[in-house]
Amino acid sequence: MKIGNMLFPESASPDGDAARIHETLAEAQLSERLGVDMLWLAEHHFDGNCAYVDPITFASNLLGRTSRIGVGFAVLQTSLYHPVRLAEQLALLDILAQGRLTIGIGRGSNGNIYEYQGYDIDPNEAEARHQEILAILEQAWTSEGALRFDGNFWKVNAPAFRPRPASHGKPAFIKPAATEATLTTLALRGEPLLLGPQSFDETAHRVARYRALLAETGYGEDAIRDRLSRCWVWRNVYVAQTEAEARRIGGEAMRQMVENRAAMRRQTYAAQGLPPHAKDIAPAGAVPGTSKGLLCGEVGQIAAEFVKLRDLGLGGVITGFRSGPLAWEAAAGSLTLFMQDVAPLVRQ
């Protein structure tokens, strides 16, 4: 099973943005030295939840600073992009990456209305825009002739697309399966999944459902194992010498992260006279145990949780080592302890 590091640096104020970005570059390079398999990048705007903001530009820098580790998006918010510009950026990045790029792609944030408004986009159009953009990306990357598209949002009339992705075809996407309906759609197409932070029981249920749907579609056991090996699940982690220390540091950072993200939504919705988003009807609070994908504990406890995920047949875990306001030194210590003491137990 592969280990990924979700680079998700929170910055409490504009004055701290540059420092968080440079710390994240250091975290990426430390990850490669420690043997992490993949760096994963998020995308959020205006709220400091993800300080580097632009994952495509950041990915290009990471690929230049590293030599082995993969780089993936979890996920690009496609509805915020111009489709032809996005096709060009990803094709170029695919060429530069030389096989190290994984494109996680989705419609956009669920709940952060200010991200859409900042880009002058109606959030209710996000899914429809996403579907048009996917169609344009596929045509741009696979069609030999002129690029023509006549949609509700995009009217494209351009010569044949260049440059082509390194694969000379459509680079493989990985998409989030936040709902059972999405999981069903992806399984019936034989596509891999990104599973978000959730309890182990929920993950096991979704993997079982994915397996069953693949089998019903006609995939044999070898093909099912192959599809599962391309799937990733997200867990936030803080590992320390004792469970008490892990919960005191990692658990508190997660609590603050959840509250910080909810505060911006509540503030924005209230200022515009909108009812609260469904995420914020109940007060944000600490995330207990593993119920929302947070794993806090000592080496043996964390290893046991990762072995359970490995035994489901999943290809990798997108591991978030730096939650919210967690200090860089604490995150680096947890990452180092994990890769030195936990990863060898998981990879046996």
Image: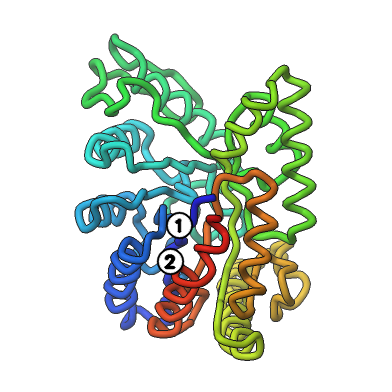
Is residue 288 among what the camera can see? yes
Is 149 on the left-hand or right-hand side of 244?
left
Is residue 266 among what the camera can see? no
Q: In the rendering, at what x and y percent does residue 307 appear?
A: 65, 58
Residue placed under numbered mark 2 in the picture = 50
Callout 2 amino acid: Cys
Residue placed under numbered mark 1 in the picture = 42
Nearer to the camera, 274 or 264? 264
Q: Residue furthest front?
A: 348
The image quadrant of residue 45 is bottom left
Q: Is residue 76 above or below residue 135?
A: below
**Helix, strand or loop under label 2:** loop
The image quadrant of residue 192 is top right
The reply to whether discs 2 and 1 touch (Cβ–Cβ < 8 Å) is yes
**Helix, strand or loop under label 1:** loop
The image quadrant of residue 265 is bottom right
Q: Is residue 231 above or below residue 158?
A: below
Residue under the image location 39 percent in, 19 percent down: 139
